Image: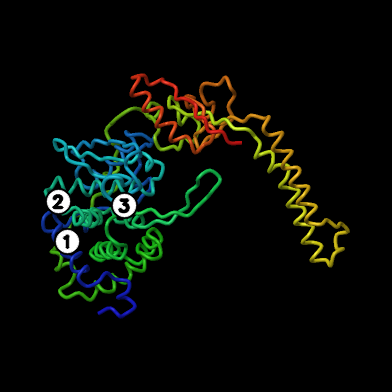
Amino acid sequence: MADDADELLLPDADEREAILDALAGLVHRRGYEHLALAPLVEPDERHFPDRWAGGEASVRRVVQRLLVYADLEALEPVVEVEDDVGLGPMAPVGVGSPGWFHKLDAGRPVIRVRESSLRDPFVLVPALARAVAAAFRAHHGLAVREPLMEERFVDLTAVYLGFGLITLPALVRHHTSRAGARVRSAVSRVGAVEPRALSFALAVVLAIRGTDDRRRKAIAALVGDNPAAFIAAATAWLGTLSPPLADRLGIPPRASWPEPPALSMLTAPLPDDGPAMSQEQRRDEDKGVVGMNAGKPVFRVERSKALRMAKLLGLPVLLLGMLFGRAQLAGGGGGMGIEIEMWKASLLAGGLALVGLVIGRMLPDARCSEPRCGESLTADQTTCPRCGGRIAGVIHHPRERLAAEDALARRSIVAGDADTTAPSTSTSEP
């Protein structure tokens, strides 16, 4: 029996039994070889030596390699890259996840991939491993009707196939993302079970194989501290099972096992399956703002520079007045040798701001309405030189952009002309 501390690191008793039953069911229906002999696939060049050029053909090569590991190399996969628009927020499994199994089409597994996930292999490859596990289940008639239960079985099947070192670290991954100059922390999730449960399943695989301490340390470094602790606690608990774990899963004595397949055979070159790297369209790069709106309508935001000039002239004086005022208070009134009364600084700042308003009203300012662009535009430009958008009209504030786009769409439907120019709005704001 595990002590109280170890119990906190384990799934509850019912879930442990359910995981063992699920793995035993896979062994019974598909054999023990995958669980006991297949290589534990790692996300590195040793296990994925195939060329990558960032498009559909590259994703298909990754899927083909995973199908080889799943003993489904005869299946020819179909990969469809989906635009993120319409998929909503990133989902951990199923439609809208980084990648998911869609269906078997005349025996061919159709795998769909979210386009943005091509830029992050740490979530793409685990999602593809789960997709191949789902295809394995569909191909062999193992899938169940209840969707959430099936997703949980997919996670366990991925571990059974040897993909646990890919999928376990991706269950919950803390990382940073960059938006322009801003860096923020983010969390990505791939999978339907919680980390203790998947760690327990991986511990079963390691225990059956008799994994030595040196290899366990390498695995701990690969999966992270928390999963490593879960695996250690599960390993200790599995050692107390009666009957022993191998008997519980229906695995024959080790002496009867064949030699495991050589990794060099499983990583042999794949048949040529698509365009050369130089011809393959990259979809794993964030193209940023440049050209993002090519052929799409944007608007010229025309305003004066009145507010900007008022702030530029008045705010520095006001801030300096506050700074000197605080310094005088801290130094007893004569610390800096300069005495500025706050009311005088405020009066001067207000006067300069008023001058800025007057001057700014005479200085027009025109910019692209795309929030991520904001490029300065001249009166004769018909396209934005930065984002490539077609200038379809004039608005007077960025917040009018969505209403102007709706008006343009309605006008285009009525006129039957996609090039109809939206009318300028009459809102006037400095």
First-in-chain label (2 vs 1): 1
- Compared with residue 136, is residue 218 higher up or lower down, i.e. above or below? below
Element under disc 1: helix
**Residue kind at label 2, given as amino acid type:** Ala
Residue 235 image offset from top left, x and y in percent: 28, 70
Element under disc 2: loop
Reading the image, the residue beneath label 1 is 22
Do the CB atoms of the residues marked 2 and 1 lie less than 8 Å apart? no
**Residue kind at label 1, given as amino acid type:** Ala
Per the rendering, the mark at residue 92 is: 3
Do the CB atoms of the residues marked 3 and 2 lie less than 8 Å apart? no
- Compared with residue 157, is residue 135 higher up or lower down, i.e. above or below? above
| Classed neighbour count for the residue bearing mark 1: other residues with Cα under 10 Å, few (<14), some (14–19), many (≥20) | some
Query: Which quadrant does the N terminus fall into?
Result: bottom left
State which quadrant residue 276 falls in. top left
Q: Nearer the viewer, mark 2 or mark 1?
A: 2
Reading the image, the residue beneath label 2 is 143
Query: Which quadrant does the C terminus fall into?
Result: top right
Give me the C-alpha separation between circle 3 and circle 1.
21 Å
**Residue kind at label 3, given as amino acid type:** Pro
Snapshot colouring: rainbow
Q: Nearer the viewer, residue 104 or 383?
A: 383
Give me the C-alpha separation between circle 3 and circle 2.
19 Å
First-in-chain label (3 vs 2): 3
Residue at x 59% of width, y 24% of height: 378
Q: In the drawing, does residue 374 fall left or right of residue 209?
A: right
Q: In the drawing, does residue 54 fall left or right of residue 344?
A: left
Residue at x 19% of width, y 54% of height: 150
Residue 310 image offset from top left, x and y in percent: 69, 41
Residue 38 image offset from top left, x and y in percent: 24, 53
State which quadrant residue 18 falls in. bottom left
